Image (cartoon, rainbow, N blue to C red):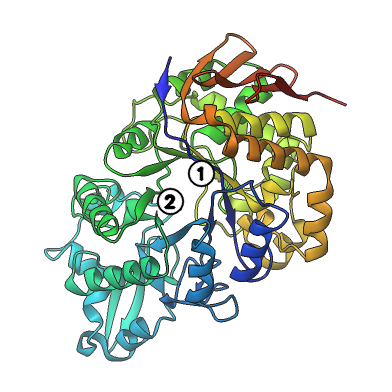
Amino acid sequence: MTSTTPRTGPQLIAYADRLGGSVAQVAALLRGPLAGAFDGVHLLPFFTPFDGADAGFDPVDHTQVDPRLGTWTDVADLASDHAVMADMIVNHVSADSPLFRDVVARGDASEHAGLFLTLDRVFPDGVSEEDLCRIYRPRPGLPLTPMTLGDRKRLVWTTFTPQQIDIDVDSPAGQAYLDSVLDALTGAGVSLIRLDAVGYGVKTAGTSCFMTPDTYAFIDALTAAAQARGARVLVEIHSHFHRQIDIASRVDMVYDFALPPLVLHTLYTGDTAALRRWLEIRPRNAVTVLDTHDGIGVVDVGPDQIEPGREGLLSREAVDALVERIHTESAGQSRQATGWAASNVDVYQVNCTFFDALGRDRARYLTARALQLFVPGIPQIYYVGLLAGTNDMDLLARTGVGRDINRHYYTDTEVDEALADPLTATLVDLLRLRREHPAFSGDFTVSGEGPDLVMTWRLGERWAQLGVDAAHGTSVVEWNQEDGSVKTCAVTRG
């Protein structure tokens, strides 16, 4: 196959408080030891507060930078030489928000009552058991919590947790709220907007309330509003791969969430067929990841959970084997942080660092990263993955939150030590190659069979190529320089 993709450099994904300690210190890392490796950075929630019940994804005030991390001026400074991506948390706000607390106190008399979604807004004529069972939710149970608002007991929509109160995005108050968030972000130079949990944003009676036609229309409108302010939009959706392909045609960027489990499957089995198939059909306007602040998704490669009968990129049996292999490779640590074993917002992701998911095998890990960097799209490298971090079992034990296994708080000393490790140094070199070599703005081809895979980029006389032996987890990266000489980076065992 052949395709043409614009040049797009790597981006870092990081919590400011867990890497550096502030927005300014993240900027210092990008301009210092990581100079030349990244074109941009996805700053995970830095709003007030960044350390709420869901690591910042439950904002009390989505329009303010938490002063412990910096100011909008710091964000604008970072945006002066790096593309900054920030989260627009579309679906909900914190239950501690002054807006919601006023509704709790005053009920319908509150001027903010229209901002928050209750059951009767979606089902004004009542709701049946069938309607409730049809609603798709990323964790067991119903997305509703009984609460007293003013002097009335109400069922409040809480898709994720009772601490995260869903917004009525169809209401004038909801629309005004979202506009205020967009204005705050783009006003500080944020040029990439990540729509967090947008698939759950619109609730329509009689549907799954997830990725319905009304949701698509909402995404279209929100994308247009962001684009009118000079920003591009990344949509975050974990679902069957056909939905990723569908949504990709409507927005600027989608995540390639199928890539992480497919890379693991490839390196576990030595069979490249499933990965090669995905490379043939996947959207090109994708952000590629192997790890993020969330877990390693498996729903993205499995059979459809909403429309039974649609096969996945992997069979149900292959997905089950994949999950068990992650648990084995991580010496059982991922099992302690996943599904029913810890406080999770879902049970369809495995919580584990990607390095541990590969048994801390350095050759397989670098091969996985090379695969990510050669796949078309914008590669984003999570801060723990950049530093080849291992499962933080102490943090997991302290918080009981499964995802914290992959959300380590790095000290300055730990960062310096990790950057000095040849494993991280090689990865940073590969990032610089991906960012600087002109071939990556040219044509992409992929070939191979069995355990062998070859990815090639070409632009005129310039080329870069990755050869993978999945059976042994080894790889070779080769590229030509401007003078025609060829450079090689071989990733082998030992």
Q: What residue type is disc 1 on?
A: Tyr
Can you tell which mark lies on residue 138?
A: 2
- Could you say which disc has been placed on residue 348 in the image? 1
Quadrant of the rendered image containing residue 91: bottom left
Q: Position of residue 16 (x, y in %)?
A: 61, 66
Q: Residue at x 62, y 25 (%)?
A: 482
Residue lying farthest top? Answer: 449
40 on left or right of 210:
right
Q: Please identify the quadrant where the C terminus is shown.
A: top right
Establish if 304 lies above or below 41. Answer: above
- Name the foreground residue: 454 vs 108: 454
Alpha-carbon distance for marks 1 and 2?
8 Å
* Position of 97 relative to 415 (above/below): below
Q: Residues within 10 Å of mark 2 (few under 14, many from 20)?
A: some
Residue at 36 percent of width and 60 percent of height: 143
Secondary structure under tag 1 reads loop
Tag 1 near tag 2, CB within 8 Å: yes
Image location (x, y in percent) of residue 284: 40, 31
